[in-house]
Amino acid sequence: AYNNTHVMRLKDQVDQHLDQSHEFQVITKSDKPGWWSKIDLFRPRRFEGRVLYLDLDTEIVGSLDDIADYPHPFAISGDWGKSRYNSSVMVWDAGVADHIYNNFTSDVMDRLHGDQDWIGEQMPDATVFPLGWIASYKATVLRRGFVPSASRVVVFHGQPKPWSLHA
């Protein structure tokens, strides 16, 4: 379970690695279970302007400005497994992905494995960040033994979590 310590950890990293003016928001309430709650990010009028989303269990290792300013209305991390996308890191212009929320029905949770599959269905031609910007701890860092220099964010999908490595 995540708590305020995890929120403050990410906020400190964002403040350190995002030079542009920003407002840090945490979404804590959803009527959807588990990872499906991420669909609520796309609720119409939830945000204004440019939105940079990061999972709490990411580790920021480089500048976030390139990600925040990535010149596409919607961009997402590629995945290292079965899904097309990994929703741990996303950026979008508020409003361009409202359909992810608007088209969601409870049967989607029975039909698909998770939010990433739903985002892939709703945004089949989404732009993926450049190779290397988002690294998987398991698929990249552990295999190579280091964080690639082009990386801006390391995604910790599953176990371990970043705070368990720094304990």
Image (spheres, grey):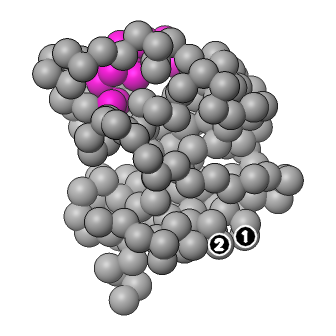
**Residue 78, percent from left and from top:** 42, 34
* Residue that sits furthest to the right in the current view: 21
Q: Is residue 119 above or below residue 49?
A: above
The residue lying toward the viewer, choosing from 79 and 47, is: 47
- Dot 2: what SS? helix
The amino acid beneath tag 1 is Gln
Q: What residue range appears in magenta?
A: 115-126
For label 1, the residue is 16
Based on the picture, tell me whether residue 122 belongs to the magenta stretch. yes
**Residue situated in front as seen by the camera: 154 or 28:** 28
Whole-percent x and y of residue 11?
63, 66
Q: Looking at the image, is 131 positioned above or below residue 21?
A: above
2 and 1 marks in contact (CB < 8 Å):
yes
Q: Is residue 158 above or below residue 82?
A: below
Q: Residue 23 location in percent, x, y?
A: 75, 53
Magenta stretch secondary structure, dominant: helix
On-image quarter of the N terminus: bottom left
Task: Please give the residue where the numbered disc 2 appears in the rendered image.
Answer: 12
Please state which of the two labelled residues, at mark 2 or mark 1, is closer to the viewer.
2
Q: For the point 73% across and 66% down, which residue is it? A: 15
Rendering quarter of residue 162: bottom left
Whole-number angstrom distance, CA of label 2 to CA of label 1: 6 Å
Question: Residue at 75% of width from left, 31% of height from top?
Answer: 48
